[in-house]
Structures are given as structure tokens and as C-alpha cells.
Amino acid sequence: MGPELDEDGWVKDPIRLDWASGACFVTPPGWWHSHHNDSEVDAWVLPLQDAGLHTHMRTLNIEFSVAQKEDTSLATALSSADSSSSSSTSSSAESDKTAAALSSP
């Protein structure tokens, strides 16, 4: 495992971690890794995906563009407009504006 890939797509200067029966480890956030079983014995692996947790906690330095933030705000506004009890004309006009904004590049 390691933080970078080489020009051929393999982990650059990999760190090897040998597993033992009953072992548990967490790949560092954002690191590349691969799984290998070089023994003659079957290995049972239970992978747990934590990407959603890291995305929510913003630990992977994922940044969203201004356009994506605006799209999210417009989608929220559309949802609020559809669920509110405002007049159908107002809600329809807001929905049209939001739909146009979401479909534009």
C-alpha cells in the first residue's frame, strides 16, 4: 500500500503488510492498496468500506466546486418549493427556474 501510483499504475514504493489469522487493519485514507494471498491456505477477507464516513467527515480533502454547491442549493430549493403549500403558479415557476439551472452547463 502507498499514497502514490507509478506510471504503470502500481503502488509506488509500496509498504507491505502481512496479515495473520484474525487480523484487522485500516488502509490509511486516500492510499492505494491491493490484496494478495501468497500462501497455499485459503484466506477469508471481510472488507468494510469507510469512504462514506470519510466523505462526511471531509478527511479525504474532497472539495466541491462552486457550481456543484449551487446545484445542491437549487435542488434543495426545488424540494422545499415542491413540499411547501405556496400557490401552484409560484411553485411551478420556481421549479422551472431550478430545472433550467440544473440542466445548464
Image (cartoon, rainbow, N blue to C red):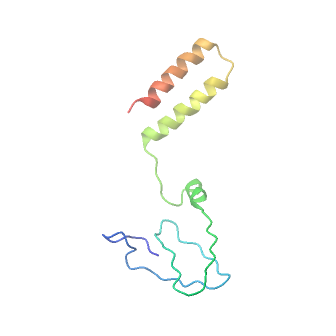
Q: What is the quadrant of residue 58 in the picture?
A: bottom right
What is the count of numbered marks? 0
Q: Position of residue 96 (x, y in %)?
A: 50, 20
In this picture, residue 48 sits left or right of residue 38? right
Q: What is the quadrant of residue 8 in the picture?
A: bottom left
Q: Residue lying at the far bottom in this picture: please name it.
A: 40
Does 4 sit above or below residue 63?
below
In this picture, residue 96 sits left or right of residue 84? left
Q: Position of residue 2 (x, y in %)?
A: 44, 74
Q: Position of residue 102 (x, y in %)?
A: 46, 31
Does 62 sit above or below residue 27?
above
In this picture, residue 22 sits left or right of residue 58? right
* Residue drawn at x 53%, y 60% as measured from the top left: 59
* Residue drawn at x 56%, y 87% as measured from the top left: 40
Q: Quadrant of the C terminus?
A: top left
Q: Position of residue 28 (x, y in %)?
A: 53, 71
* Residue drawn at x 54%, y 22% as measured from the top left: 95
Depth order, front residue of 64/18: 18
Does 78 sit above or below residue 25?
above
